[in-house]
Image (cartoon, rainbow, N blue to C red):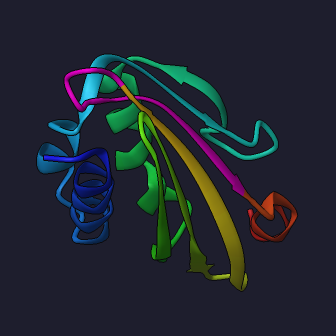
């Protein structure tokens, strides 16, 4: 499976809320980076800790989704562009995102850096 295929698989698993399948795409020592302005944000180390953060998303959002529109193949790095949408009892937001995913030689995700408009999310949290 190519890194692009793994990135697509990860987004599909996340979209259907299948954290068990998503976990298979991550290396055990993976690192995940998001805006430290948000709950669960900053740098998270370790596949289990990353999955635990993902499992908490429903505590903040009644609906949450990321819709990729483009996967850019850079060999061991894949850049995903798309739209992030979320809502809770205070409102909703939509924001473009860029996600830089780095893979090891075994095709496992070792680092994910997610860039989006965190101000829009922070206003609702």
Q: Is 60 on the left or on the right of 16, as rendered?
A: right
Q: Residue at x 32, y 54 (%)?
A: 4
The percent coordinates of residue 36 (x first, y second) are 77, 36
Q: Is 83 on the left or on the right of 14, as rendered?
A: right
Q: Is residue 49 above or below residue 84?
A: above
Q: Is residue 50 above or below residue 58?
A: above
The percent coordinates of residue 70 (x first, y second) are 49, 74
Q: Which residues are magenta?
A: 104-115
The percent coordinates of residue 82 (x first, y second) are 57, 75
Q: Residue at x 26, y 30 (%)?
A: 108
Residue 83 within the segment the image draws in magenta? no
Q: Is residue 123 above or below residue 90?
A: above
- Taking depth in this image into account, of 78 and 42 the one nearest to the observer is 78
Looking at the image, the residue that sits furthest to the top is: 29
Examine the image and state in which quarter residue 125 appears.
bottom right
- Taking depth in this image into account, of 6 and 38 the one nearest to the observer is 6
The percent coordinates of residue 22 (x first, y second) are 21, 47
Q: Is residue 23 above or below residue 18?
A: above
Residue 113 within the segment the image draws in magenta? yes
Q: Residue at x 40, y 46 (%)?
A: 54
């Amino acid at each position: 499976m190519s890194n692009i295929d793994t990135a697509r698989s990860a987004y599909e698993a996340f979209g259907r809320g299948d954290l068990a399948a998503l976990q298979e795409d991550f290396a055990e020592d993976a690192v995940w980076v998001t805006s430290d302005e948000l709950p669960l944000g900053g740098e998270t180390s370790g596949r289990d800790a990353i999955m635990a953060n993902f499992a908490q998303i429903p505590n903040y959002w009644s609906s949450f989704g990321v819709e990729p529109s483009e996967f850019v193949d850079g060999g061991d790095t894949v850049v995903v562009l798309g739209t992030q949408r979320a809502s809770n009892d205070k409102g909703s937001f939509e924001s473009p995102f860029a996600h830089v995913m780095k893979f090891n030689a075994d095709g496992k995700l070792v680092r994910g850096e997610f860039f989006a408009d965190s101000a829009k999310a922070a206003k609702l949290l």
